[in-house]
Amino acid sequence: MDAGIEELLAGGRHARAFDLVVPAYQDRVFRLAYSILKERAAAEDATQEALVRVWKALPGFDGRAALGTWIYAITRNTCLMELRRRRPTVSFDDPDSAEAQHAATSIASGPAADPEHDNLLRLVDALPRNQQEAVRLFYLEDRSYEAVAEQLGMPLGTVKNLLHRARKRLMELARPDEVKAA
Amino acid sequence: MNNPTLIGPCADYEHELVDLQDGELADDRARALRVHLGQCARCRAWAAEFAALDARLATDLPRPALSPTFDARLQERLAALARPAVRGDLRAALVREHDSLVHGLRRVARRRAALGAVGSAAATLCLLAAARSLLAQHAGLLHPVAEGPERWVLLGAIGSAIALAALAWSVARSGMPGLGWRR
């Protein structure tokens, strides 16, 4: 698919190339945006914004990077701009920070309508941001390390390490209190 | 600390247990790991706990999809962005076409005027030569007028009149170089 798109781009047929880019990439761009922004509507807006940027920049695409790598980089930048615009009040980037520890503890033991389900989602939210993104994307992409590495722009080994640490941390946080106290 | 999951798996096998769960472990390593799992309660307990977490993450994490109207909204936005560019491109193309047309017409008019001038000069020379020849044949009839320097004044006057007439005809037909063009 990418070879066909790049052939069209080399021939200066940018509009036709973009017509192929949209169906080939829109779902993956959306999943990447969702893994970063964590909200469906915001992810959809970011997907549209990213694809518009791709449309504008496509005539300047020089092929030095793979088309997917280039599109995902645009998507990540779009999402990071959105995150900066939101000005977060509490950061969980440091898993050992007092805020993260407190949030994880209160989340794990707090009341919920469906405690098992809700607690797991909240525990994921308590992970450092890069681990959250990797975990969400890994399961959205049907457990594909390669897809996560390509979309997050990281080496495969880094992604494996991130996922390993994230799931190990989730196992620790998800243990019932009585087991932790044992 | 008697719960085996709290102790964790054997350090040598931890990453392979994860790879096994993710389906990333090579067959020979997977066989060796299964042998180890049969013998090690700690690794077995940790692997079971990891598998349970993996299954929950796979089922419980949201799997949102783009809304059905996404494509239409994207195309609408792209069309809105493309519209001014199309108008601009159209205007530029029309200006280019107009300039090209004017330039072409001017070039044709100049070529015709130049050809007309050359033709006029040639016709004048021919007529002068014919007039001279006639004067030579009928020198007796024109003797009083065409004698000495007056003969050349007469020839010059005839030639100038012919040249002016030819130029006037040429200008009326196609135009003069440097004076613009007209149809």
Image (cartoon, coloured by chain):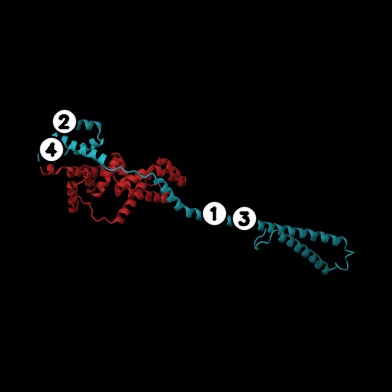
Chain colours: A red, B cyan
Mark sitting earlier along the chain (4/3): 4
Residue B55 position (above or below residue B76): above
Mark 3 in CB contact with mark 1 (< 8 angstroms): no
Q: Is residue B169 among what the camera can see?
A: yes
> Which quarter of the rendering shows the C terminus of chain A?
top left
- Which chain contains the residue that carries disc 2? B
The kind of residue tagged 2 is Gly
Numbered circle sitting on residue B38: 2
Would you call the spot at circle 4 few (<14 residues within 10 Å), some (14-19), or many (20 or more)? some
The kind of residue tagged 4 is Pro
- Separation of marks 1 and 4 at Cα, in angstroms: 78 Å
Say which of marks 2 and 4 sits in front: 4
Residue at 39% x, 51% y is A53
Residue B20 position (above or below residue A30): above
Mark 2 in CB contact with mark 3 (< 8 angstroms): no
- Residue at image mark 3: B104
The kind of residue tagged 3 is Gly
- Residue at image mark 1: B93
- Separation of marks 2 and 4 at Cα, in angstroms: 15 Å
- Separation of marks 3 and 1 at Cα, in angstroms: 16 Å
- Which chain contains the residue that carries disc 3? B
* Residues tagged by mark 2 and mark 4 found on one chain of the structure: yes
Say which of marks 3 and 1 sits in front: 1
| Rendered image quadrant of residue A179 | top left
- Separation of marks 2 and 3 at Cα, in angstroms: 91 Å
- Residue at image mark 4: B4
- Which chain contains the residue that carries disc 1? B
